[in-house]
Amino acid sequence: MIDIPLVDLRAQHAQVADEVAEGWAGVLERTAFIGGPQVAAFESEFADYQGVAHCVGVANGTDAIELALRALGVGHGDECVLPANTFIATAEAVARSGATPVLVDCVAETGLIDPEKIPAALTDRTRAILPVHLYGQAAPVELVRAAAPGLPIVEDAAQAQGASRSGVPVGGLGEIAATSFYPGKNLGAYGDGGAVLTASADLADAVRLLREHGSPRKYEHPVLGFNSRLDTLQAVVLSAKLRRLEAWNESRRTAATRYTDLLADLPGVLPPEVLDGNTPVWHLYVIRVPDRDRVLASLHEAGIGAGIHYPTPVHLTGAFANLGHAAGDFPVAERIATEILSLPLFPEITEDQQHRVVAALKAAL
Ligand SMILES: Cc1ncc(COP(=O)(O)O)c(C=O)c1O
């Protein structure tokens, strides 16, 4: 029985329950479930929060990445560079756009894309670079840009709502960005949801067209599109949660600092490192430990809901066997996949719960 979960959504729901119930009652009353003022309001609030001019709500984070790529004109015959150490969706979205994912290795201390590995991955077919702001901290986008001059940057900001680098919020570090409102995200919906963020009115318009059957007006379809909209009911939840996101992210920072302090005297445990200039939002608190699988099993036995993000780098999944890679191609991503361990972290985690997690970890080691 897990008694300290990896993420506790119940504690979060309790804080917004009344607001959500009231907002949903209004939507149900009007039976207007697609679009409407709630979606437009959330898009505008989230654009302001992320410091970008445009936010386009879509059905999920994977679609958000794909539509961002398609808005840039990426398609068949093109290549896009992304880290081998990410959630599969980053690579899926590239493949679904018709382009070929080209993987590069990551940095062990942060799990983020290694900019030094990018130049060797570039060809005359490269059309975009997708740094992933993994675990809640920004990738070093300025180094990525320097390594791939002139190529558009598509940020995968699914895990980093509210994070910033050198004072600039993620979502505004590249040409276009995608985020996910999967329930466990820092800003999570009550189902699937996602958004595209950009400073460019043209790119935002292109995504708006694609999400709505390629249709600028009813029954006009100048381009082939998708059905990928953010639900009205989800927009109500997201607006209610957005008002609390800064405070929740601050609580995550306090909890992360506490873990790092508590772990300081645990030999063999490597806490996560934060890049200079980053303000992270700790979507996940990922340590590296020896004998990880045994440690994880022991934590589960002790009722601690630790996890692994992610156990298999993209190139070793069956889904991407067609890329023709083998074990050993991305050694850092492969090594850390055997060492990483995500400890329970959510805004409401208590000091006592964190002490119990660390005590269980100590016993396991
Ligand atoms: C890094 C990353 N990219 C993309 C996604 C895809 O988002 P979604 O599940 O909303 O499609 C996720 C989350 O699931 C993610 O963590």
Image: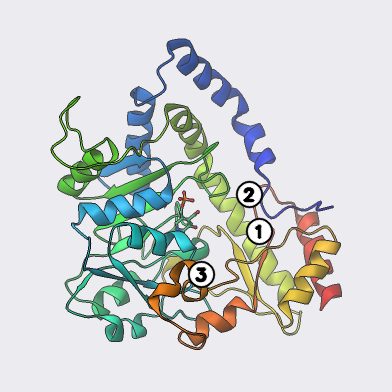
Secondary structure, mark 3, is helix
Q: In the rendered structure, which amino acid carries the disc numbered 1?
A: Ala
Sequence-wise first label, 1 or 2? 1
In the image, 24: left or right of 213? right
Q: Position of residue 61 (x, y in %)?
A: 42, 50
Horizontally, is 363 left or right of 242 in the view?
A: right
> 16 or 183, which lies in front?
183
Can residue 344 be seen here? yes
Mark 1 touches mark 2? (CB < 8 Å)? yes
Of labels 2 and 3, earlier in sequence is 3
Q: CA distance from mark 1 to mark 2?
A: 8 Å
Mark with earlier residue (1, 3): 1
Q: In this figure, which residue is indicated by the disc labeled 2?
A: 347
**In what quadrant of the picture does the C terminus appear?**
bottom right
Identify the residue at image location x=48%, y=71%.
314
Q: Do labels 2 and 3 touch, CB within 8 Å?
A: no
